[in-house]
Amino acid sequence: MLKYIIIDDEPLAHEIIEEFCSMLPHLQLEKNCYNAMEAMQYLNENTVDFMFLDINMPKLRGLDFLRTLTKPPKTIITTAYKEHALEGFELNVVDYILKPFSFDRLVKAVNKVSENQTTKTIVKEISAEDTSTRFFVKGDKKHHQIDLSDLLYIEAYGNYTKLFLKDEMIVSHEKISHYEAILTDGNFLRVHKSFIVAVDKIKFIEGNRILISEHKIPIGQTYKSTVNKLLS
């Protein structure tokens, strides 16, 4: 679990970062700080793995605040001002992202923080009898029990994966190769470098795509022969 704080004088910025980070199960918000002085007091008494830091704040600028720290946590700069990027990287920030930023961009920044971490989000199965039908995934700060009968398909998403179920989607901090290894049930098939599908959920196969529910999933060139076996 990676602990982080947000330092920004805009409440909306906190809401956006919190919302995006809640989709990444290995992150834990420790503190919302609305100015540098508040963050300084918190960091004097606590430690975190990284922080989101705005630049343009009253009283003490974000980069000036960063200079005051002897052992700062890893830092992701979040700002509307691109002209301070060089100054930020001279202070060894992990990443510098411009507002407004997308979820994808935040994930890329967080990946740089966690690239040396070995956080696991899959926990031990319930029991030996159940390992073929269900497992747990940590997402949105909860442990979700996944019943394989509800799993439609899995999509690779950088260092993460998206698990698409009948009624929801869960983001997991595991690569798709992990799921390919644990899904020993013959019902699951890798059809693309970025997709594993539940065979019994396929509506139809047409050309180079598979339809599951309303989702269109591509068939990778190297996986065509595997998919064609389903048709023979």
Image (cartoon, rainbow, N blue to C red):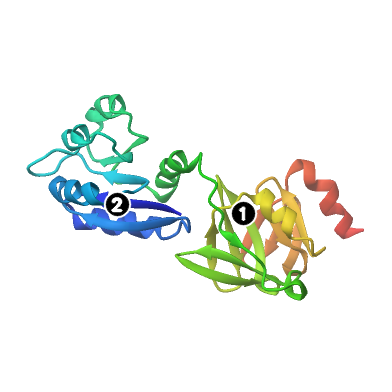
Q: Is residue 68 above or below residue 25?
A: above
Residue identifier under label 1: 155
- Give how far across and how far down residue 223 sits, in percent: 79, 46
Q: Is residue 5 above or below residue 148?
A: above
Give the residue type at disc 1: Glu
Give the residue type at disc 2: Ile
Secondary structure under the numbered disc 1 in the rendered image: strand
- Give how far across and how far down residue 214 sits, in percent: 61, 66
- Residue pictured at 55% horizontal, 70% vertical: 144
Residue identifier under label 2: 5
Question: Where does the C terminus fall, quadrant-wise?
Answer: bottom right
User: Are dots 2 and 1 in contact, CB under 8 Å?
Assistant: no
Identify the image quadrant of residue 57.
top left
Query: First in sequence: mark 2 or mark 1?
Result: 2
Q: Is residue 82 above or below residue 122?
A: above
- Give how far across and how far down residue 228 sits, in percent: 86, 53
Q: How many marks?
A: 2
Q: Nearer the viewer, residue 46 or 66?
A: 46
